Image: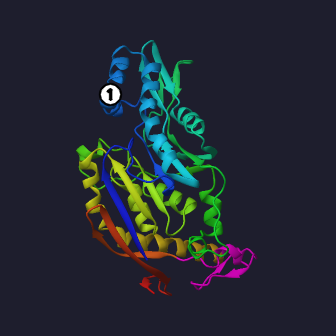
């Protein structure tokens, strides 16, 4: 199997992609009213800087979302019928104008994308554990003027129209299945994921709001199949590209900051090892689950076709993992080759 990964230094408000050409969008935009991204929004619309200078928080908030809305228009245009869009965003808290308040980015984006015709599906909260001793803001021990600290972000999920259809027994779809017990965790509406330090310079890290690889990897596995194309219009340091690469999907990523995109060159070198590590971890976790299931007196009803393990449902029988063999730099990004992973008795991986 071969996948391609386009990496474009450019403006996501003008995606050089045909209509209905991507199957899944996974992205995390700059968050309106979070100070680290003020300059980005002000560069794209000078009226944002004026609103902030006037301490008009509501006007600045709406203007920032107007900037994002031009990207959402492109996302809707290129997303195929039945395609899924997953948008990771956090709300903002800020003292501006007459005092402290919360700015609900997740609600504003939901409104704007549904106004553009996408269907909102149940979303996901993912919690980022904090080690801070002070988890509140405001007046300390005296009521009523303290505020909770936001320790979660939203993964908003949308579909473009009706559900996708596939030919009966489609190989790519059935090989892309996830395990029954993974489904029960992944499709919960509350995730608790630890952060992941990106292997980029400190200056670049300050300009990036990268999420941990586990987050886009789950979303890619949940909402796409082998052969699909995943788009990230705010690619940053390339975590969505990495997720698509190790999961055996194609990808396209845009970012205006060429320095951020350059950090991806070093990261893709780890793709062969990471793809196999992730696949072996999933297989090992599943085998452990099967053992526990049997110990509890519940025998799974089916056998996997490609692995020496039982599975719980018919839909899991053809599940198959692919490892990255190598990644080649191209004029547009990267080309990767993949081959099936076989589970060995000693827990190591080998190519089929």
Say if 243 sits above or below 135 in the image. below
Q: Residue at x 45, y 33 (%)?
A: 134
Q: Quadrant of the N terminus?
A: bottom left
Q: Residue at x 46, y 76 (%)?
A: 322
Is residue 44 found inside the magenta-colored segment of the image? no
Q: Mark 1 points at which residue?
A: 42
Is residue 302 found inside the magenta-colored segment of the image? yes
Span shown in magenta: 292-320
- Name the residue furthest front: 18
Q: In this view, does 217 lie to the left or right of 187?
A: left
Residue 177 visible? The answer is yes
Residue 128 visible? The answer is no
Name the foreground residue: 308 vs 21: 21
Name the foreground residue: 220 vs 308: 220
Q: Quadrant of the C terminus?
A: bottom left
Q: Which residue is drawn at 38% across and 18% down?
A: 51
Residue 92 screen position, x and y as percent? 46, 31
Q: Residue at x 40, y 48 (%)?
A: 233
Residue 172 screen position, x and y as percent? 56, 73
């Amino acid at each position: 199997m071969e996948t391609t990964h386009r990496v474009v230094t450019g403006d996501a408000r003008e995606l050089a992609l045909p209509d209905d050409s991507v199957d899944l969008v996974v992205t995390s935009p700059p968050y309106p009213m979070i100070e680290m991204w003020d300059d980005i929004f002000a560069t794209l619309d000078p009226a944002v800087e004026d609103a902030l200078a006037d301490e008009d928080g509501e006007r600045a908030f709406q203007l920032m979302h107007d900037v994002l809305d031009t990207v959402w228009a492109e996302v809707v245009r290129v997303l195929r019928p039945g395609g899924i869009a997953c948008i990771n965003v956090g709300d903002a808290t800020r003292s501006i104008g007459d005092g402290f308040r919360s700015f609900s980015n997740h609600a504003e984006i939901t409104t704007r994308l549904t106004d553009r015709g996408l269907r909102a599906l149940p979303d996901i909260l993912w919690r980022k554990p904090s080690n801070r001793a002070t988890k509140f803001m405001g007046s300390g021990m005296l009521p009523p003027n303290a505020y909770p600290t936001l320790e979660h972000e939203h993964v908003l999920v949308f579909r473009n129209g009706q559900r996708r259809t596939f030919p009966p027994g489609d190989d790519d779809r059935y090989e892309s299945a996830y395990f029954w017990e993974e489904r029960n965790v992944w499709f919960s509406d509350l995730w608790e994921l630890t952060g992941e330090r990106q292997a980029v310079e400190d200056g670049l890290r300050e300009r990036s709001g990268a999420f941990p690889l586990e987050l886009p990897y789950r979303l890619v596995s949940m909402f796409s199949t082998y052969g699909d194309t995943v788009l990230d219009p705010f690619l940053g340091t390339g975590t969505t590209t990495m997720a698509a690469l190790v999961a055996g999907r194609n990808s396209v990523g845009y970012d205006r900051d060429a320095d951020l995109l350059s950090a991806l060159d070093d990261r893709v070198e780890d793709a062969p090892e990471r793809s196999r590590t992730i696949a072996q971890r999933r297989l090992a976790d599943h085998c452990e689950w099967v053992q526990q299931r049997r110990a509890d007196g519940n025998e799974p009803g089916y056998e996997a076709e490609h692995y020496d393990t039982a599975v719980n449902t018919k839909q899991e029988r053809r599940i198959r993992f692919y490892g990255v063999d190598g990644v080649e730099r191209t004029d547009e990004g990267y080309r990767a080759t993949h081959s099936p992973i076989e589970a060995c008795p000693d827990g190591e991986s080998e190519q089929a």
